């Protein structure tokens, strides 16, 4: 089904009953082909972390319950889920009666697994959980006084490196792109860990800023950045983690790594979340 058939960017009516068919799948292969990524031999491992903040249902007495959820979609899934369809799907539970939160969790995980053709994992939490804001790990490069004039399309020729081997972690809060369909802005904080030839921080910041007017899905932006770095410096280790701000009650946080046995970064919430 073409992307034009999705509800993204269109006026929508919220369903008053649970409806798994609201989930709209988007094949990963289409955007990966544009990046020269072989879907049968991915150059990375990882997950897309979806945090949901508008989640509610009814208990067996008809009393509403509210919570938040975190779901992990593996990078080798055949499909991703279009974000607006996920929001509409979650809101279809608003008048749905469940025996327990565990039942709600099981239903959502099964539906997501069915539509992505992968095993989706995750957890639903009550909202009376204390949350503290953190800061991204690594050295922030936003302080660099650079002159910018390229805001898209993304230009990997801007990436420069020094002929010296390092192991470092850097971050930036200046990543911005736009939704492929609606043009709405996606604001992100990116954390990059790598081992290999040293990236020139000023040049790399210009590269990140060149995404500013780019129209791509969050997952595609993450994979473009990963492959651009990998193809430029051929690192021994590389991981990127992008924490996007929420839109429509959902934020998407892609993580990609060269290491098959990766450890996910801390799920500490950043101030813009």
Image (cartoon, rainbow, N blue to C red):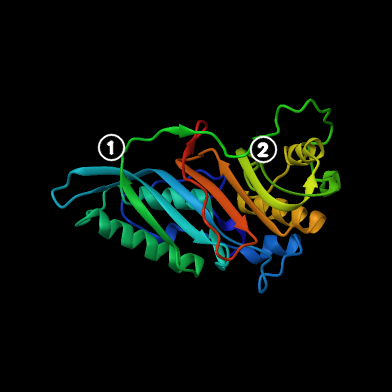
At which x and y percent is residue 229? 76, 52
- Please tell me which residue is depicted at 56% across the width and 41% down the height of the picture: 244
Q: Is residue 179 at all visible to an observer of this figure?
A: no
Does the CB distance between marks 1 and 2 fall below 8 Å? no
Which residue is identified by label 1? 128
Is 40 in front, or is 236?
Answer: 236
Camera-side mark, 1 or 2? 1
Q: Is residue 257 rendered to the left or right of residue 213?
A: left
Circle 1 crowding by C-alpha within 10 Å: few under 14, some 14–19, many from 20? few
Q: Is residue 245 rendered to the left or right of residue 226?
A: left
Q: Report the disc number at residue 218.
A: none
Is 12 in front, or is 167?
Answer: 167
SS of the residue under disc 1:
loop
Is 92 in front, or is 236?
Answer: 236
At which x and y percent is residue 91? 37, 47
Quadrant assignment for the N terminus: bottom right
Q: Earlier in the sequence, mark 1 or mark 2?
A: 1
Q: Is residue 131 rendered to the left or right of residue 203?
A: left
Question: Most extreme residue toward the bottom, as rendered?
Answer: 40
Above or below residue 249? Residue 103 is below
Q: Is residue 156 rendered to the left or right of residue 176?
A: right
Q: Is residue 209 at all visible to an observer of this figure?
A: yes
- Please tell me which residue is depicted at 78% across the width and 59% down the height of the picture: 234
Q: Report the disc number at residue 176.
A: 2
Above or below residue 175? Residue 46 is below
Between the C-alphas of marks 1 and 2, the distance is 32 Å
The answer to which quarter of the image holds residue 45 is bottom right
- Please tell me which residue is depicted at 42% across the width and 46% down the height of the picture: 52
SS of the residue under disc 2:
strand
- Please tell me which residue is depicted at 60% across the width and 45% down the height of the picture: 242
At which x and y percent is residue 271? 50, 31
């Amino acid at each position: 089904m073409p992307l034009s058939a999705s509800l993204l960017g269109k006026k929508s009516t919220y369903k008053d009953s649970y409806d798994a068919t609201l989930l709209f799948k988007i094949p990963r292969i289409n955007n990966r082909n544009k990046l020269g990524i072989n879907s049968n031999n991915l150059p990375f491992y990882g997950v897309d972390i979806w945090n949901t903040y508008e989640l509610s249902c009814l208990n067996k007495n008809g009393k509403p319950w509210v919570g938040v959820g975190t779901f992990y979609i593996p990078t080798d899934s055949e499909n991703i889920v279009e974000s607006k369809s996920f929001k509409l799907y979650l809101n279809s539970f608003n008048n749905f009666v469940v025996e327990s939160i565990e039942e709600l969790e099981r239903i959502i995980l099964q539906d997501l697994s069915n539509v992505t053709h992968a095993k989706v994992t995750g957890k639903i939490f009550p909202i009376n959980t204390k949350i503290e804001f953190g800061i991204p790990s690594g050295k922030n490069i936003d302080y660099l006084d650079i002159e910018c004039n390229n805001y898209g399309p993304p230009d990997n020729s801007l990436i420069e490196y020094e002929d010296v081997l390092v192991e470092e972690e850097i971050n930036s809060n200046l990543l911005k792109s736009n939704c492929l369909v609606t043009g709405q802005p996606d604001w992100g904080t990116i954390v990059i860990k790598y081992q290999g030839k040293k990236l020139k921080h000023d040049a790399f910041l210009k590269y990140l800023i060149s995404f500013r007017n780019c129209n791509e899905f969050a997952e595609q932006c993450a994979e473009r950045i990963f492959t651009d770095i990998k193809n430029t410096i051929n690192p021994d280790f590389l991981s990127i983690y992008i924490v996007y701000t929420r839109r429509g009650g959902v934020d998407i946080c892609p993580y990609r790594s060269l290491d098959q046995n990766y450890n996910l970064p801390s799920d500490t919430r950043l101030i813009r979340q």
